[in-house]
Amino acid sequence: MKFISKIIPILLAVLIFPFGLGFGGPEKPDDETLRYKGQLLSIRWDPLTQSPLIMRGIDTHLMELKNFSKLSREEVTHTGPQLVSKYQSLLQIGPDQLKLKGAEKISDTWYVSYWQTFQGVILYESSLGFSIDSRGRIKSLGALIYPKVRAPVTPKISHEKALKIGQDQIKDFEKLRCRLVAESILIYPVRKANSVDYYWVYAFNFFPEEALHPATTEGGWAVFVDSQTGKVVLFEILMKPLGCCVPEDWVPPKPEEMRPKW
Amino acid sequence: MLCPGGLGSSQARGDETEVVNSKFLKILLVVLFISLSVFSCKGKPKKSSLPRLGTAAFDFNCYDLRGRTWRLNEVRSKVLLLRFWNDGCPSCRVEMPVIEAYYRRLKSEGFMVLAVNVRQSAAVAEAFTAQLDITFPVLLDSDGKMAQRYGVYAVPTSFLIDRQGIIQKIFVGEVFKEEKFLRDLLKHYFPR
């Protein structure tokens, strides 16, 4: 009995001590209230990337823009990089990693959103965005960002080969008179149970000719081809994206312009 | 970058559905940056068929971002705007604040919005929701089955379902950016 009574506290200490010192693993709670540079913030963390999914100021705003009503649209679009600079150590990405996705004024509120980039290449489905009220206040932000991107930056297979691989995924490509409607390069993050895999991909959108007519209900295909192995990492049937809001002055980039600048 | 003619024109799909296709050509060209819904099989995509107006809406059983399960029966006494969307669709983003404003204004009178994210992860939907300060429930149709059941072939697609669970309107494409459109639509159900 004496032995047991001595050993139990030791066992408990051995079990509990490492967690008390933070050896229990780096996982943060999903929701957390913390003080950052004197400001009280509420943060919902992405358990997979350890980056904020939602960030709100408690009793204060994340940012308040002076003379907001006088700002031009372009000046409004600079808000994202400013916000990222202010909270950089929490967001863990740099302001130069943002690429504007959209900025729309609806009623008196601006809605601004960005993609995250890595080496100038957009991360598929990434986003960081917020609203700015009529008084220039940003109360919260929502983000799906990837602070620790590890992706190759040099393709091992050519664009032409990747295109052929993409086309070969579609049965009856010729018979359906499929068209390459859009193409780009992207970083494709694949969220797994405990980690994220990053693929530098050639991304192609193909549509059968008849599906291009707006009255049809048919879609097309998206094919993502890994630039390193030529493996197809995504094959999806696309829905038709309808609507507007592509800037009037938007000009489709040429394929050579869509290649990374290295 | 091939796009046959005729894409720029708007065209109604029968008299059942109002199809808004403005700038469709441009949208197709940037479609890569648009995250898209999927039915994961190779070969020719299946043709979709929207339900008929005046018929009963299909029941569903879908989780929202908070983990709550939603069924049509739970909202049967309300005027429901059932909206299929995804993060990459530009007009989905632009229209949400307009819908949110009417939801806040009319929810106590029985206006309900269920926004169904099609084939994207909860993280994508959650970030989107936070960016736009959305307070109505956001449902996750991660396998796309609910969208398939409703015959959704494009995003955004919205169904206006009355208090008896009957589909009264279907809108494919962007229609709510102009606030007046939604105001006029809801005036019939909420006259004040």
Image: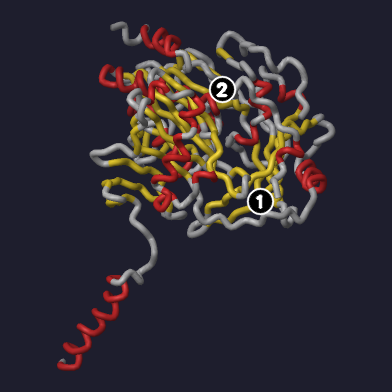
Label 2 crowd bin: few (<14), some (14–19), many (20+), radius 10 Å: many
Element carrying mark 1: strand
Is residue A10 found left or right of A236 in the rendered image?
A: left
Residue drawn at x 68%, y 48% as measured from the top left = A201
> Disc 1 designates what residue?
A200
Residue B73 in view (yes/no): no
Left or right for A215, reference A66 = right
Q: Residues within 10 Å of mark 1 (few under 14, many from 20)?
A: many
User: What colour-coding does the image apply?
Assistant: secondary structure
Residue B55 vs residue A27: left or right? right
- The reply to whether residue A224 is visible in this rendering is yes
Q: Label 2 sits on what residue type?
A: Cys
Vertical comparison of B24 with A77: above or below: above
Chain containing the residue with disc 1 = A
* Image quarter of the N terminus of chain B: top right
- Secondary structure of the residue carrying tag 2 is loop
| Sequence-first tag of 2 and 1 | 1
Residue annotated with mark 2? A245
B127 vs A177: above or below: below
Q: Position of residue B28 (x, y in %)?
A: 67, 27
Q: Most extreme residue toward the bottom, as rendered?
A: A2
Estimate the x, y position of residue A122 in percent, counting from the top left: 60, 43
Q: Nearer the viewer, residue A262 or A147?
A: A262
Q: Is residue B56 above or below residue A157?
A: above
Residue lying at 31% horizontally and 22% vertically, measured from the top left: B104
Chain letter of mark 2 equals A
Residue nearer the viewer, A254 or A169: A254
* Alpha carbon distance from label 2 to label 1: 28 Å
For the residues beneath circles 2 and 1, the answer to whether they share a chain is yes
Toward which corner of the image does residue A220 lie, by quadrant?
top right
